[in-house]
Amino acid sequence: DAMVIQNPRYQVTQFGKPVTLSCSQTLNHNVMYWYQQKSSQAPKLLFHYYDKDFNNEADTPDNFQSRRPNTSFCFLDIRSPGLGDAAMYLCATHMSGGSTDTQYFGPGTRLTVL
Amino acid sequence: QQQVKQSPQSLIVQKGGISIINCAYENTAFDYFPWYQQFPGKGPALLIAIRPDVSEKKEGRFTISFNKSAKQFSLHIMDSQPGDSATYFCAAGPGGSQGNLIFGKGTKLSVKP
């Protein structure tokens, strides 16, 4: 059974048109992450939530925002997508203080910007 | 101090051979070292992980070797199979409360039949 679910799997948007990607989890983990992964590159952390506390990476553009309305859901909002924002967006979860430090990744959303 | 350097960038191995991927880290505060396997179009999946209190961990055909003094760790895939063809990422992090990971740049492994 899927534990970290991302919707949609593929998203096409136009240059400058806002887009929202969603992530949900059935693991009840308190930490959720958003990564950006471009072709043939490592995942790059954009930000993460530790419970309700939002932690932004210093080099994450202001164009990227996130919301976490409850433990299970987290959203990535791209306010004005540019061509350079085309990438795979990965959501991951982690249980702080749990028996393992594993991060569990979703299948990703492939974003295309036209 | 936050980098994880991974090599090689790509690797071609014959079926049945041994695949070896190396990583080096800088931050001595790191104490969690996972390897992730990623197939095209999929999210990374945890393959195997190690903590610095042991020098080796084996799970099936996959082994992590860890050298704390050299700040290096490596993944060995024994009896490599075409189904192992994927991109492998090493990562390192402090573990614990927030579990943030620093990823290596990845190694694309191709196992030839």
Image: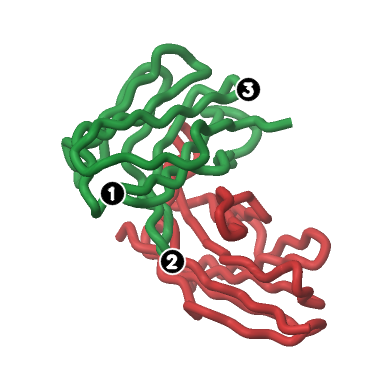
Query: Of circles 1 and 3, which is in front?
Result: 1
- For image coordinates 35% across by 62% down, the residue present is B3
* Chain to which mark 1 belongs: A
Mark nearer the N terminus (1 vs 3): 3
Q: Do labels 1 and 3 share a chain?
A: yes
The outermost residue toward the top is A70
Q: Residue flagged by tag 2: what amino acid is it? A: Ser
Question: Which residue in the structure is indicated by mark 2?
Answer: A40
Identify by letter the chain in green.
A
Residue B12 position (above or below residue B31) = below
Spatial distance from mark 2 to mark 1, Cα to Cα? 21 Å
Mark nearer the N terminus (2 vs 1): 2
Residue A114's mark? 1
Q: What element carries label 2?
A: loop
Horizontal placement of B76 versus A8: left or right? right
- For image coordinates 56% across by 68% down, the residue present is B73
Label 1 Cα crowd, 10 Å radius (few <14 / some 14-19 / many 20+) = few
- For image coordinates 64% across by 78% down, the residue present is B110
Specify the quadrant of the image occupied by residue B4: bottom left
Identify by letter the chain in red.
B
Quarter of the rendering occupied by the N terminus of chain A: top right
Q: Residue flagged by tag 1: what amino acid is it? A: Leu
Question: Which residue in the structure is indicated by mark 3?
Answer: A26
- For image coordinates 46% across by 30% down, the residue present is A32
The reply to whether callout 3 and callout 2 are in contact (CB within 8 Å) is no
